Image (cartoon, rainbow, N blue to C red):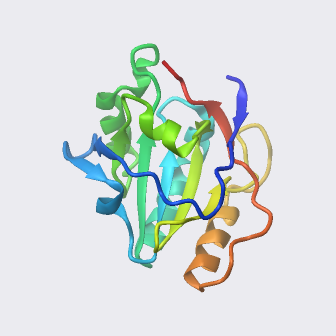
Amino acid sequence: MALTESNMLALGVKAPTFYLPDTTSDRHLSFEDIQGEQGTVVMFLCNHCPYVIHVNAQLVAIAKEYAAKNIGFVAISSNDAVNYPDDAPDKMRLIAKVLQYPFPYLYDESQAVARAYDAACTPDIYVFDKAGQLYYRGRLDESRPSNDKLLDGKDLRLALDLMLRGEPPMHKQYPSAGCNIKWK
């Protein structure tokens, strides 16, 4: 799988809205439904990407830790499930259950939401402040499946901590990297 980096959507933009089916609850959810009082993390993930598989446990740990600080979390899969059946909604539900995702796992069948966020890869991570403006976009940390860097979520954790303290965003933000979104 070719390594693809984030497109780095401009900081300060308003969170694109969505209304997507949640594979874990069979409800449709919007950005407003998952928005946290102190901010919101939107993650583009999928089931089969080795980069996502590598970071899943850290994403779950961060979501549990920061949900207690009133940060909302959501995962969205926009992959073409016809050509990539491992990313179909029934498989998404299974992965969310097995990995105990503490956040909804939404399916973007039309891929319109991925396009609105200018998402390019999985994982692709966006942090919006309490006003719904983009505060951070980029990588979880330096760790990749093929390197020996510590998987600790330090970049995302730093962004969330700065935002919660009311400080300006980090000047230097590094793109995420992973498998490309599987476009139709």
Q: Which of these two is toward me, 95 or 184? A: 184
Residue 91 image position (x, y, % from top left): 34, 29
The answer to whether residue 58 is visible is no
In this orientation, which residue lies closer to the viewer: 136 or 46? 136
- Drawn side of residue 91 relative to residue 1, left or right: left
**The N terminus sits in image quarter:** top right
Quick check: 64 above or below 25? below
Instruction: Give the number of marks.
Output: 0
Q: Quadrant of residue 165?
A: bottom right
Relative image position of residue 114 (x, y in whole percent): 49, 38
Q: Nearer the viewer, residue 30 or 53?
A: 30
Q: Which residue extends farthest bottom?
A: 165
Measured along the vertical axis of the image, is residue 167 above or below residue 73? below
Q: Residue at (52%, 52%) from the top-left corner?
A: 57
Residue that extends furthest to the left in the rendered view of this protein? 26
Give me the residue at 57% from left, 40% from top. 119
Residue plotted at (47% across, 33% down): 47
Instruction: Say which quarter of the image contains residue 51.
Output: top right
- Seen from this angle, which residue lies furthest front? 13
Residue 132 against residue 77 in the figure, above or below: below
Q: Is residue 38 visible?
A: yes
- Residue 35 placed where, x, y %? 37, 65
Residue 38 percent location from the top left of the image: 45, 77
Residue at the spot 48% in from the left edge and 72% down from the top edge: 66
Left or right side of 34 for 116: right
Above or below: residue 98 compared with residue 165: above
Position of residue 148 in the picture relative to residue 66 (left or right): right
